[in-house]
Image (spheres, rainbow, N blue to C red):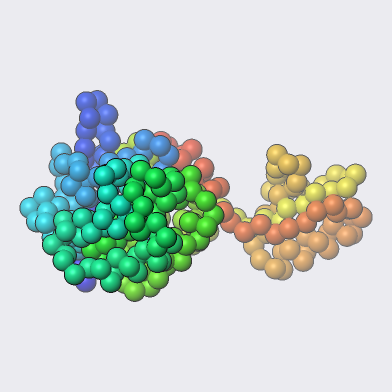
Amino acid sequence: MTPAVEVRDVRKRYGKLDALDGISLTVEPGEFFALLGPNGAGKTTLISALGGLVRADSGELRVMGHDVIRDYREARRSLGIVPQEIVFDPFFSVRETLELQSGYFGLRDNGKWIDELLERLALGPKAGANMRSLSGGMKRRVLVAQALVHRPPVIVLDEPTAGVDVELRQTLWAFVRELNAAGHAIILTTHYLEEAQELCSRIAMMKAGRIVALDETARLLAAFSERVLRVKFAGCELPAALAAGASLAADGAWRLPVEGAAQVESALARLREAGARIEHLEVAEPELEEVFVKIMANAGEAAPVPA
């Protein structure tokens, strides 16, 4: 099967800065894939190279098998990008903006799909409004609609929920989940790591232009994070029998590593035996934020995690 996106040893240098330092990855059709990293890691440069806005110094980039340089027309027809920055033409209404975008791809009778996009992204009441009159959140909805107007098989969402309200997040993710279920490949960059953990089956992490981790979400969580029992005590200390491997969190709760229900029961039994008075108790599942922090901290010391 032809990959949705294929990146092979891509390099891009700006002066002395290696924005992309030998990036290689593959995204399969219908996959929900996260591309994570701190600011300046190279994520947007990679996305810009996929979209033809930046030309890589070396390497190969393909979208649905189409080389982004040699077969740029088909590559761009296969790709829809929601940019991080809010950009718009101030002379057109929302509907006119989507009709103009359709024209870029040679789509003349696209009214039905435009109507559906307006409805699904709650833009219907604003269809005739000039783009200048829209709020920031509404403008971002139009950017999403523009990226989807030609029904691309590959959709890139570059920080799509940055600074937007809860309603838009819920509306957007419900729609994107449906598109993914229908077979569209989704590539997501976000600083809201809980979104990536919930939505994406695989994750690549970038730092300083390199991929420092790439694996299934569940495997990354299992390898770099752990399930813990979080306990706050009322006027007493942690029993010595549970001190091994325990750590104290900033909020005063003790974190006790546990692998499963049996260890939770055992830890609770030891707390009862020690006469500990518990103020608060919860089992915390592995979190992608913890994984991200650990991988970024060790990125300069260890080799990249293989796919």
**In the image, 216: left or right of 45?**
right
Q: Is residue 183 above or below residue 89?
A: below
Identify the residue at the far bottom of this view.
182
Work out whether residue 266 or residue 62 is closer to the camera in this orientation and state it: 62
Who's the residue at 27% across and 49% down the image?
92
Q: How many marks?
A: 0
Work out whether residue 46 or residue 48 is closer to the camera in this orientation and state it: 48
Identify the residue at the far top of this view.
16
Q: Is residue 64 visible?
A: yes
Which x, y percent locates residue 307?
35, 57
Identify the residue at the far front of this view.
128
Who's the residue at 21% across and 50% down the image?
51
Who's the residue at 73% across and 41% down the image?
251
Which x, y percent locates residue 13?
22, 33
Work out whether residue 198 or residue 296 is closer to the camera in this orientation and state it: 198
**In the image, 72: left or right of 301?**
left
**In the image, 186: left or right of 162?**
left
Q: Quadrant of residue 29?
A: bottom left
Who's the residue at 84% across and 48% down the image?
233
The quarter of the rendered structure image containing the N terminus is: bottom left
Q: Is residue 187 visible?
A: no
Which x, y percent locates residue 120?
41, 66
Q: Quadrant of residue 121?
A: bottom left
Identify the residue at the far left of this view.
70
Which x, y percent locates residue 265?
77, 66
